[in-house]
């Protein structure tokens, strides 16, 4: 038991110190009184990803991307989707489809274990980079995601832009009913966890994070009452005393705790729009300014930054995005997108911030 515990702790330390600074993504889920389900996340990476919005139509042919040892799966898209990609690829790392299904990839270093595949797996393999595309263009609900994940293998080839490795991911899938699951490649198989809180970060495994929550059940958004020691009354110095002791660093375990607390403590919201705006406020708590989280990559300092924040309203079918260069919210309304086209469309995001000048004009 001690040996296994030491191995787990060592793996955690390794994941947090020796891998590139690219593992600070945080996901939350909010529910509104009108039945809206809103899922949001931050997307962090150390090197520029040239993030864009990607639109994939219905009825086009796609495949599972580059895999080693087998031919990738090919399919015809059933659902149109809008997502956010990286490096100009057609592969979305986060997205929403026309049925209200949302799927997103999160970094999962040192724990992602993909199976080895051979020619016997031809046509049954999807790379980690294209797993979001596969699920969003083929499935309408979390129930369908479960079935689809059980019928394929997720493996891949090394990607030069990702440091010559197979990108280590796990995924969250949520639908407009509010059901949410986490899919993790562990031991060469896809393990599915129920996700009742709709929260996700990075390594270790999702079940570890849920167990770790029990270490923080004392946290409460209500301020603690005054206490008396002998005849002296001591009051809290300011607001927020109920959350004293909540971890505030950028490590995945700490962010998971904060994401769970903030998303559960939020006041009731009337509409999906209210939940969208509240999601951005919560996710601002996880925004990483340049220089606050730094790793060493090939002997050079590399700073993790929040390159994008993405929020999806699964009922209204709207995807919202902010990026590092521009915090102004951008939106794509899937109800108005023509998914009958034959080509994948990419939309650039702003490269600089716009600032409203409200200075009154002199008379």
Image (spheres, helix red, strand yellow):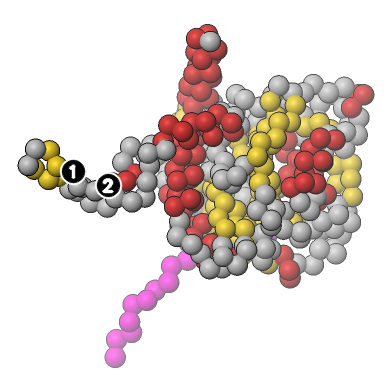
**Residue at horizontal 50%, vertical 9%?**
2
* Horizontal side of residue 65 vs 262, given as left or right: right
Q: Is residue 188 above or below residue 360?
A: above
Above or below, 119 against 56 in this view is: above
> Residue 301 in magenta?
no
Task: Give how far across and how far down residue 353 sits, in percent.
Answer: 48, 61
Residue occupying the point 61% across, 39% down:
106
Whether the magenta-drawn stretch holds residue 350 is answered as yes
Give the label on residue 224, or none: 2
Give the residues in magenta.
346-363
Q: Secondary structure at mark 1?
A: strand
Quick check: marks 2 and 1 in contact, CB under 8 Å? yes
Identified at 65% across, 31% down, the residue is 168
* Left/right of residue 36 with respect to residue 262 in the rendered view: right
Q: Is residue 166 visible?
A: no
Secondary structure, magenta segment, majority class: loop
Question: Compared with residue 261, is residue 313 higher up or lower down, i.e. above or below?
Answer: below
Q: Is residue 354 visible?
A: yes
Question: Foreground residue, 219 or 16?
Answer: 219
Disc 2: CA contacts within 10 A as few (<14), some (14-19) or many (>=20): some
Q: Which residue is mark 1?
A: 227
Q: What is the x, y in percent for residue 136?
A: 76, 50
Residue at the far left in the pictured view: 231
């Amino acid at each position: 038991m001690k040996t296994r515990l030491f191995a787990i702790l060592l793996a955690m330390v390794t994941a947090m110190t020796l891998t590139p600074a690219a593992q600070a993504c945080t996901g939350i889920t909010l529910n509104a009184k009108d039945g809206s389900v809103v899922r949001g996340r931050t997307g962090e990476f150390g090197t520029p990803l040239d993030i864009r919005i990607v639109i994939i139509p219905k009825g086009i042919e796609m495949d599972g991307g580059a895999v080693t040892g087998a031919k990738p799966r090919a399919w015809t898209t059933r659902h149109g989707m809008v997502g956010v990609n990286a490096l100009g690829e057609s592969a979305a790392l986060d997205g929403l489809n026309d049925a209200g299904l949302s799927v997103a990839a999160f970094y999962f270093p040192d724990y992602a274990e993909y199976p080895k595949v051979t020619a016997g797996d031809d046509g049954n393999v999807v790379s980690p980079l294209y797993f979001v595309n596969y699920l969003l263009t083929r499935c309408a609900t979390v129930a369908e995601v479960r079935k689809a994940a059980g019928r394929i293998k997720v493996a891949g080839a090394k990607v030069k832009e990702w440091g010559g490795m197979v990108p280590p991911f796990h995924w969250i899938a949520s639908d407009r009913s509010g059901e949410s699951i986490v899919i993790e490649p562990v031991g060469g198989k896809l393990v599915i966890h129920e996700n009742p809180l709709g929260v996700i970060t990075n390594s270790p495994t999702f079940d570890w994070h849920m167990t770790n929550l029990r270490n923080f059940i004392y946290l409460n958004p209500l301020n603690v009452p005054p206490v008396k020691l002998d005849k002296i009354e001591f009051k809290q110095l300011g607001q927020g005393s109920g959350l004293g002791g909540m971890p505030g660093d950028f490590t995945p375990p700490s962010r998971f705790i904060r994401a769970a607390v903030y998303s559960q403590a939020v006041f009731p919201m009337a509409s999906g729009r209210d939940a969208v705006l509240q999601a951005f406020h919560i996710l601002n708590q996880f925004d990483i300014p340049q220089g606050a989280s730094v790793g060493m990559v090939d002997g050079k300092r590399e700073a993790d930054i929040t390159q994008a924040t993405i929020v999806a309203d699964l009922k209204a079918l709207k995807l919202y995005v902010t990026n590092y260069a521009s915090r102004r919210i951008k939106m794509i309304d899937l109800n108005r997108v023509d998914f009958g086209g034959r080509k994948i469309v990419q939309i650039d995001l702003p490269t600089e911030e716009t600032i409203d000048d409200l200075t009154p004009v002199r008379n």
